[in-house]
Amino acid sequence: MASHNESIIREPLITGENITYAKVTEDILRPVENMPNRAWWIGFTLASLGMMLWVFAVSWTFWFGIGEWGLNKTVGWAWDITGFVWWVGIGHAGTLISAILLLFRQNWRNSINRSAEAMTIFAVICAATYVVSHMGRPWLAYWPLPLPNQFGSLWVNFNSPLVWDVFAISTYFSVSLVFWYTGLLPDLATIRDRATGIRRRIYSVCSFGWTGSVKTWQRFETVSLILAGVSTPLVLSVHTIVSMDFATSLEPGWHTTIFPPYFVAGAIFSGFAMVQTLLLVTRKVLGLENYITMFHIESMNKIILLTGSIVGVAYLTEFFIAYYSGGEYEQYTFLNRFTGPFWWAGCLMYGNNVLMTQLMWFKSVRTNIFISWVLSIVVNIGMWYERFVIIVISLHRDFLPSSWAMFHPTWVDFSVFVGSIGLFFTLFLLFIRVFPSIAIAEVKLLLKSSSEQAKKELLKEGHQEPEQAEFYKQSLNKFDSVTLSEYEKL
Amino acid sequence: MSSTKFILGLFDDPDVMMHGIDKLQKNSIPIYDVYTPMPIHGIDEKLGLKPSRLGYAAFMFGCLGGTTIFCIIYYMLVHDWPMNIGGKPAFTIPNFIPATFEWTVLFTAFGMTITFFYATHLFPGRTPRVMDLRATDDRFVIAIDAKGNIPHEDITNVLKEAGAIEIKHNDRKYVSYE
């Protein structure tokens, strides 16, 4: 029930004075119900310029073919698949937050799940466009589907991880979309019931006639729980299958049984970094500091630290197995990451992902907004280089030295990549403009139990253990949205 | 005969509303429905609603999805056009698992959600049947069908005693129809 008193030692999930249900609605819908501020317009202009660059570069690729990219006979996959895996990985945090943290009853997910799920969808869109454009002849993109055809009825090969990937990515995208939109319905109804005129009509269509009756909520909760239950193995399967695109080959550096867990951990790692990058800016620009608090930031940093360390262990395992296997091609590939012509990419990968993340062991780093933001960018860069290192460094020097080659990106490679970031941000900025960026109904659930004001009431009542009360007050020091002076009297 | 169709008790606190439900039930006043801005656990039990059966639907859709794609793969790769891949058998079950798993999840998610929308009458463009516009914002609304023998004043008094901050006598069932 809503009034369940939570243990005092748990940190508050909603801060601020006089937060009522109405104020939650008001605060979260402010960007939706008012004209956007200057920061939004600047961001949107830049992002849509990037998106236009993307449209141009992808059209260029479609018109002239992928010969316009820097690929050659030796390096047949480069920035395209790097970008694809990077974007799919970024998508994984959204499902982790919305599904896995729901199953674990982590209430702090309630205020970040909506925007993280939106990120998932936009990131998978970016990833899917890479897959389609790297096919070279995108008008034949339906060929991986098991459709009846006239090629002697030669079906697609279900033994191939590339076909599994078609199934995994398309299922992942559509299930994430359903999960996200079903969760949006109650909040769209909130906007509808406050709006007038044409806005009311639009949100009325979008909210499917939601009323919030008992039976609707009961079914809604069942649907959320089961969707979370099926999305959890789904998200693990998606990056497992992406890793099998590589792991089932015979290429040194790819042919590795550790790839599935290593890729899944890396995906969650990079995804949380992107969530952090976006939310640290969003909470400031939209004034949501009371809902996305320092506790949320620190929790996300802890997950970045955990998954970053798992990735670090995977890296070490790879090196050890390359040495221990005695396979000279394998050994060369891993030495080549530091001694070859792409040594700098190897250093960026290992340095950014493993060494920089270890700074998160320090609480002062985890709770510093600026450093957290910089580190999240560092992780984004590091994880892009991880895919680049795995794909390009492995390919450019493998079995036959006579086939060795270098990879040099062209302006089209650059433009498609920079443009896809523009596309992602354009979609994200449009999202925070028209949809509530925080799940209103789910945040309201926390108001009576986990908010700072509820805990303050508990302290005022004075039945708490003194050590626990002291512990709680100490934990508030790190929050940037709490007025500490009032706690001295308590 | 009054023209009141529905009596609404508006509460600003979910726990007070829960006591309100108890109080109404103690006075044998039948509750039509309760509208809340967020899911409140326990109302469904109080109102005697059966647990949702969507879980069974989800399970069956999942079985259907897995069976469908497995049959498709079997037909394509084993029955219709078995390929000779290094002399290995055509019926390679482990390789069929990823696609089978994906469609199990796909059918579960879509089948269950569509069943939910169908059963709850939710679809794009449906006219929202809202009794009070603040029920999606900050009011917890108990709706009582005014038809019946209980005097309306008694219902109003019970709601007032239970702590309702506002009591409405609506002449129309839904306020949202334009």
Image (cartoon, coloured by chain):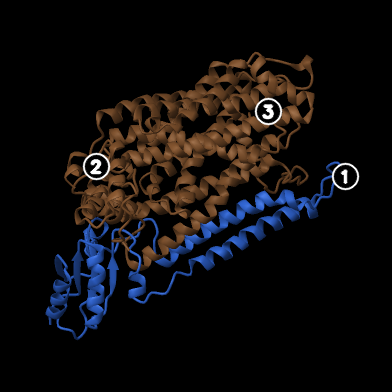
Chain colours: A brown, B blue
- Residue labelled with disc 3: A319
Depth check: give the residue in front, A133 or B113. Answer: B113
Residue linked to disc 2: A30
Relative image position of residue B131 (x, y in whole percent):
24, 65
**Numbered disc 1: what chain?**
B
Q: Residue at x 41, y 25 (%)?
A: A374
- x, y percent for residue A252: 73, 28
Please state the chain letter of the residue tagged with numbered disc 3 in the rendered image: A
Q: Residues within 10 Å of mark 1 (few under 14, many from 20)?
A: few
Lateral position of residue B76 relative to residue B86, left or right:
left
- State the residue position of label 1: B87
* Residue A278 spot, x, y in % from top left: 39, 33
Q: Chain of mark 2?
A: A
Q: Please, what secondary structure does the residue beneath circle 1 have?
A: loop
Whether residue A145 is situated above or below residue B176 in the rendered picture: above
- Label 1 and label 2: CA atoms lie apart by 65 Å
Q: Amino acid at mark 2?
A: Arg
